[in-house]
Amino acid sequence: MIYFDNAATTRVDPKVASVVQEAMLDVFGNPSSPHTLGLAAERLVRQARDALAAAFGCRADEVYFTSGGTEGDNLAIRGVLEARSRKGKHIVASAIEHAAVLETLKHLADVGLCEYTLISPDGKGYVAPEDLVAAMRSDTVLVTVMAVNNEVGTVQPIQEMVRQVKATDNAIYFHTDAVQALGKIPCRVTDLGVDLLTASGHKLAGPKGVGSLYCRRGIRLSSQTTGGGQEEGLRSGTENVPGIAGFGLAVELAMNQMTERVRNWREMQECLLRLLEEIPDSHVHGEPLSNAPHIINVGFPGVKGEVLVHALANEGLFVSTGSACSSKRAPQSHVLAAMQVPRDVAEGSIRISFGSANTTKEVERAGELIAKAVAELRRFQRQ
Ligand SMILES: Cc1ncc(COP(=O)(O)O)c(C=O)c1O
């Protein structure tokens, strides 16, 4: 099996799995309990918070654990809207955000709680900071742009976006969805300048169902989950201690090994691009080598992306069309559509995404399998 669908989710690192297991079987106390088992669980949560704070270059008390990227994005958007209602309810976002952002905005607008403006990227997937500023209004409370796009891997100029947004209206908060960025590119919040940043555990060999929201001190955010007051009252509910402990270790490993992992991924990207170039009429989207190191999205007109994904899976190669969350529903990728990719190319596109355990040898084999499957499907299509 060759697993190249790591932007959808990753296999948990065995070291992470053993920390999760230990937290489940041995350190099973409630972190709010005053006895020794509770204190031991609280220590695990604290260690994980410290690991995330080190990765983001922030204070530990600016990191809040959530159930994943979707909740982090929801909390940032809904929490800001509620806390800043006096200023207004307008939000500016990129048109290529994950569904966790786009569907939330759509829903909130449908029920009258927000208005929003979406900014399209250029043909390579980049969103221009000037376009964000041009869309801002006096009642804008939040600008939200993802650090790395999950379908094509475009890295947005977040630092420059924040600079321009704040220079125009310093009272607007800036949120970035860094779910695909953490462990792949530097995510230090002081360098980026963001007020809010979402991360998720399962994209970097951590467990599913756990994530975090960085919220800069002084930023006003309303809780969306009330109850026992955990996470400084921002996100009530007994902490997912096993998940949090695993997430903390996964982030620590990813940060310690980032230079080496990125070097390997770049080699793998270069190798795959060479192999894809040999396939007639193949279209690589965006500029993978100057963007996220772990993603390549390529289209083959004359082939249906879903059919290709199934044909490759039958050969033991796992890739995806677009994002895993939407590929079962949406006939066409909203990201490729926003990038003005012609329909036949977009429909024949697949996303190949690497994880920490992948090798160049696997890329060579994958290149052969893709070339063979594309040729066969095109032949079949023509008959
Ligand atoms: C960019 C981005 N944001 C948010 C999410 C949602 O994260 P989670 O699956 O942890 O809810 C994903 C997952 O696919 C993602 O790629």
Image (tube, grey):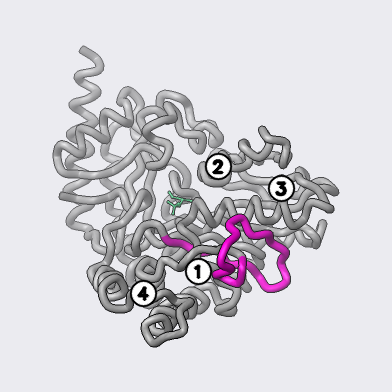
- The earlier-in-sequence mark between 4 and 3 is 3
Magenta stretch bounds: 210-233
Pointer 1 residue = 186
In three-dimensional space, the C-alpha distance between marks 4 and 3, rounded to whole angstroms, equals: 36 Å
Quarter of the figure with the C terminus: top left
Q: Residue furthest top?
A: 383
Q: Is residue 77 above or below residue 167?
A: above
Residue 258 in sight here: no
- The earlier-in-sequence mark between 1 and 2 is 2
Front position among marks 4 and 3: 4
| Position of residue 271 measured from the top left corner of the image (x, y, whole percent) | 28, 53
- The earlier-in-sequence mark between 2 and 3 is 2
**The CB of the residue at mark 4 lies under 8 Å from ligand 1:** no
Residue found at x 40% / y 41%:
284
In three-dimensional space, the C-alpha distance between marks 1 and 2, rounded to whole angstroms, equals: 21 Å
Pointer 2 residue = 96
Q: Amino acid at mark 2?
A: Ile
* Residue closest to the eye, 293 or 111: 111
* Residue closest to the eye, 148 or 213: 213
In three-dimensional space, the C-alpha distance between marks 1 and 3, rounded to whole angstroms, equals: 23 Å
Mark 3, Cα crowd under 10 Å, few <14 / some 14-19 / many 20+, is: many
Pointer 4 residue = 249
Pointer 3 residue = 132
| Position of residue 278 measured from the top left corner of the image (x, y, whole percent) | 26, 39
Q: Main secondary structure of the magenta part?
A: loop
Q: Amino acid at mark 4?
A: Leu
For the residue labelled by badge 2, is the local secondary structure a helix, a strand or a loop?
Answer: loop
Q: Amino acid at mark 1?
A: Pro
